[in-house]
């Protein structure tokens, strides 16, 4: 079957290569802003940990700057420019932007627009953020970011992947040259320096590119709409794990390692849960023995918390990112932001 995909992969590579060259040559226009703009993205289709990394960036900058988050709002039921407020639902802006807003509330401005130039222009007009973080916009070149951060999954690095439809890459590996920072995400906690050196050689970085390795850290609590439980207090519980994300193996491995009994219901990425889905979840939950809760991801929680049936039994497990060189990374980010923060629009 792979042989059949080669011609299509070649055509896709050529189309994306020509498109990128048109931007490089100025035949397609990228709009620049006299504000710091940080783009977080990847080469592959989903699952590299963009949302936790955006949250990490927000955590670094939120106390000193008003941050505008701009996303296309994948999976939402609206079109055009929207911004988050306390009445907004995930259906209006998408689950990931909703996750950012609910994590930080009035600390950030969250906007969505499939035309990000239009969205940024409107966020500036309405709120005038100090800087912007573009979520999943590495291939969206109509906005010229000042700092590009490229993520690649330790378990599925881009140098072992192929372009669509042969693999999962949205563009060829030539695209990596746009990044000033490359982060290998979801690394094991015991990653050795020799392994890092080996990965660095395979990445074939440019002299101007900085490399970091990150791991996922699970918090020691689970959170519902009304209460918080310590993970250590529920180790003997039966857990119904519900996921609607691209790569669920990490949280499944964590749950099976931590809890005595884990039942897993998996749905597709960005799944819009229906009443019949929730009925299935509820029926599965009732079959669990002893003390039990339903556990999900923070992103899935934004799509499930509104169902009354799950109100008192649905919890999410917050995750955070840990970098191998946090101070060096922080200096790079602050240097870029500080250098570009005194410019007028």
Image (cartoon, rainbow, N blue to C red):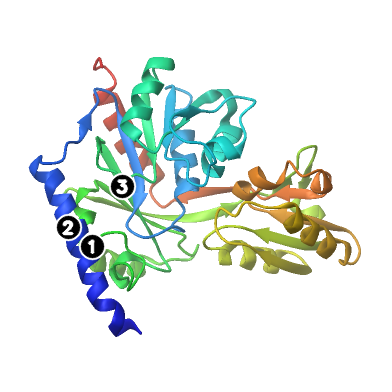
Q: Residue at x 42, y 27 (%)?
A: 68
* Position of 4 relative to 104 (above/below): below
State which quadrant residue 118 falls in: top left
> SS at mark 2?
helix
Q: Nearer the viewer, mark 1 or mark 2?
A: 2
Are the two marked residues, 1 and 2, in contact with CB atoms closer than 8 angstroms?
yes
Where is residue 310 drawn, in percent x and y?
80, 48
Q: Is residue 236 left or right of residue 29?
A: right
* Position of 62 relative to 208 (above/below): above
Q: Which residue is drawn at 44% across and 49% down?
A: 50
State which quadrant residue 132 falls in: top left
- Identify residue for label 2: 17
Quarter occupied by the C terminus:
top left
Where is residue 60 drawn, in percent x and y?
44, 34
> SS at mark 1?
loop
- Identify residue for label 3: 138
Label at residue 172:
1
Of marks 3 and 2, which one's residue comes earlier in the chain?
2
Say few, some or many: other residues with alpha carbon within 10 Å of mark 2 (under 14 / 14 to 19 / 20 or more): some
Where is residue 327 drawn, in percent x and y?
38, 41
């Amino acid at each position: 079957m792979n042989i059949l995909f080669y011609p299509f992969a070649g055509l896709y590579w050529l189309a994306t290569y020509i498109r990128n060259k048109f931007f490089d040559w100025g035949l397609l226009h990228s709009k620049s802003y006299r504000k710091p703009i940080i783009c977080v993205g990847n080469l592959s289709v989903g699952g590299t940990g963009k949302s936790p990394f955006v949250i990490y960036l927000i955590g670094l900058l939120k106390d000193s700057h008003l941050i505008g988050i701009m996303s296309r709002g994948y999976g939402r039921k609206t079109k055009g420019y929207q911004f988050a407020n306390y009445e907004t639902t995930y259906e209006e802006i998408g689950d990931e932007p909703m996750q950012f807003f609910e994590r930080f509330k009035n600390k950030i401005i969250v906007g969505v627009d499939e035309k990000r130039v239009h969205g940024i222009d409107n966020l500036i007009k309405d709120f005038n953020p100090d800087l912007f973080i573009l979520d999943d916009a590495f291939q969206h070149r109509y906005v010229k970011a000042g700092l590009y951060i490229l993520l690649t999954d330790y378990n599925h690095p881009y140098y072992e992947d192929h372009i669509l439809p042969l693999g999962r890459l949205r563009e060829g590996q030539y695209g990596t040259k746009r990044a000033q920072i490359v982060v290998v995400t979801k690394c094991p906690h015991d990653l050795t320096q020799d392994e890092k050196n080996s990965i660095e050689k395979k990445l074939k970085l440019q002299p101007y590119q900085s490399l970091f390795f990150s791991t996922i850290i699970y918090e020691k609590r689970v959170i519902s709409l009304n209460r918080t439980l310590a993970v250590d207090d529920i180790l003997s519980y039966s857990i119904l794990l519900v996921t609607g994300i691209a790569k669920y193996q990490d949280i499944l491995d964590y749950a099976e390692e931590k809890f005595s009994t884990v039942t897993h219901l998996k749905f597709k990425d960005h799944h819009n849960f229906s009443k019949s889905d929730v009925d299935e979840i509820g029926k599965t939950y009732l079959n669990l023995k002893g003390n039990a809760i339903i556990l999900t991801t923070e992103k899935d929680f934004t799509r499930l918390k509104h169902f009354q049936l799950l109100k008192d039994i649905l919890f999410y497990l917050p995750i955070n990112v840990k970098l191998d060189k946090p101070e060096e990374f922080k200096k790079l980010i602050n240097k870029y932001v500080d250098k570009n923060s005194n410019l007028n629009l």
